[in-house]
Image (tube, coloured by chain):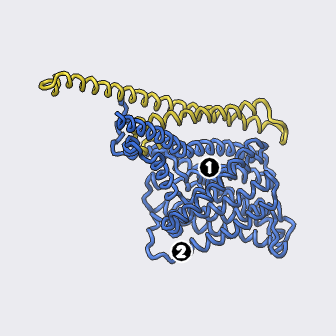
Chain colours: A yellow, B blue
Amino acid sequence: MTLNEGYMPDAGRAMDAYANLIQTKQDKQKVSSVSNIKLGKLLIVIGFLVSIVGIVAYCMAGFTTDFGAEISIAGKTGLALVAAGTVCWFIGALKFFHGAIEANLPEELFF
Amino acid sequence: MYGTGWFRQASTMSEIICTNAKMNQPGANALGFPLAHVSKRIAELHPAYFALVMATGIVSLACQSFGLPQAAQFLFFINVPAYCVLLILFSIRAWKFPAQFFADWSSHKRAFGFFTVVAATNVLGCQVYQLSQVERLAHYLWWAGLLLWLVSTYTIFVLLVVLQQKPSIEDGINGGWLVSVVATQSVCVLGCQLKPLVFTAELSTLLLLSFWLFGGMLYVWLISLIFYRYMFFRFEPGDLVPPYWINMGAMAITTLAGTELIRTYAEVSPVTAMIPFIKGLTTMYWATATWWIPMLLCLGLWRHGVQRFKFTYDPLYWGLVFPLGMYSVCTLRLGEILEIAPMAVIARVFLLAGLIAWLITFLTMIQRPLFAILLAVLYTNRSATNTLEGKNDDAE
């Protein structure tokens, strides 16, 4: 029994339904924010790791080829990995920030 | 769903929530908050931000030295706009926030950051010379670097001497002071590559040799104070700021300047007579740089591993990337002069470390502008939605 039901039953039920609707909407938004933050963090870490592997592959390929020679397949793969990792990181950062802003996290927590 | 402690720390007093509250007001100025955010960042802009250009430039030059031209060119294309954008931001800061800008010149903690402008100008000059072969522009950058060095040196040191209120050595000094050494040696390094004519060839050589010697002298003075601060004052994890890596970086660029003097002016007086002296001193500088590396790694481990100091982006982290790239280049050049081939292997390891450190620092740096852009987009969208809802309510 809600406070409003005592003197205006219909209006009370309508207000409760509206409150529940808002609550559900806010809960859904919170769930979405948390999942964005988690996915964003995961993509950021994966992006970093892939980029680092790419840098190592590119450097190793460069160190073993002659000075001024064409870039080898391994070198090109390394560069592609760096690019892919950076894109992955970028998407992750966008998702993370979007989730953090929606969840009203203070700025100092995510920088 | 807010199960982790990380989320529970979220405070409703935060700036973001205030922003969101403002966002919900119909008809709120769509770009008001993001502009305020950018304005605040410009007002707080650290004078040492040019370390970004220094670090990017030296990693690029190291890539070029090791036959990685794609990476070298890519970093060069990032560095030119970065230098221009920073110049514009510094100009805006000087014009819009003169109090903060000029206060930095007499701050023991921030003044030495202005020396990064000198070093960045000269490192960019090296890049222009080696990667684009536009020699005239490189010459302009060298003259600009020389002028900036004169202004920075004789403004900052004089202001700090005559200052009435001075901090204790514990609060005042940090590794960032050694950027003055880096700036001095950068004039010598670019000068050796360009061989500018200052009246006569001998006089030019003497000038560059003097810069190399000024840098060595400054290092001895400053590192004595820094080491004294290390040993005899309380040292908190927060005190170990990233520019402490300049302890090593300053020695690395001094080594590089020594090798450039030997390579370029071996046949010109007065360097000819001093070749054994320069070789010996250069090797000592390289050894000193090498000595610092394990020490700094241990201190970093203590800061982040033992004391659990949180890693957050700070422009000063560029002061950590620069020494890695510089150590790589100087080790390669010294190995060539001393004819010790295995030194190239050490140089390669440091190039790899420098590239990885550069990428991590760069990606961490662009988080803030990315956040500001995202905030602006969300803010604009919400303002538009709220305005529309407000109009609909009025119509009803």
Which residue occupies the extreme front position in the image?
B395
- Please give the name of the residue rendered at 33% of the width and 45% of the height, measured from the top-left corner: B13
- Please give the name of the residue rendered at 69% of the width and 45% of the height, measured from the top-left corner: B351
- Residue bearing mark 2: B159
- Please give the name of the residue rendered at 43% of the width and 73% of the height, measured from the top-left corner: B165
**Residue B382 in sight:** yes
Which residue occupies the extreme left position in the image?
A6
Q: Looking at the image, tell me whether mark 2 or mark 1 is earlier in sequence order.
A: 2
Kind of residue at badge 1: Val
- Residue bearing mark 1: B321
Quarter containing the N terminus of chain A: top left
Please state which of the two labelled residues, at mark 2 or mark 1, is closer to the viewer. 2
Quarter residue B112 falls in? bottom right
Report whether mark 2 lies on the same chain as mark 1. yes
Question: Is A60 placed above or below B153 here?
Answer: above
Q: Secondary structure at mark 1?
A: helix
In-front residue for pair B80/B118: B80
Quarter residue B208 falls in? bottom right
Q: Which chain's residue wears label 2?
A: B
Q: Position of residue B314 (x, y in %)?
A: 52, 50
As drawn, is B363 to the left or to the right of A107? right
Q: Residues within 10 Å of mark 1 (few under 14, many from 20)?
A: many
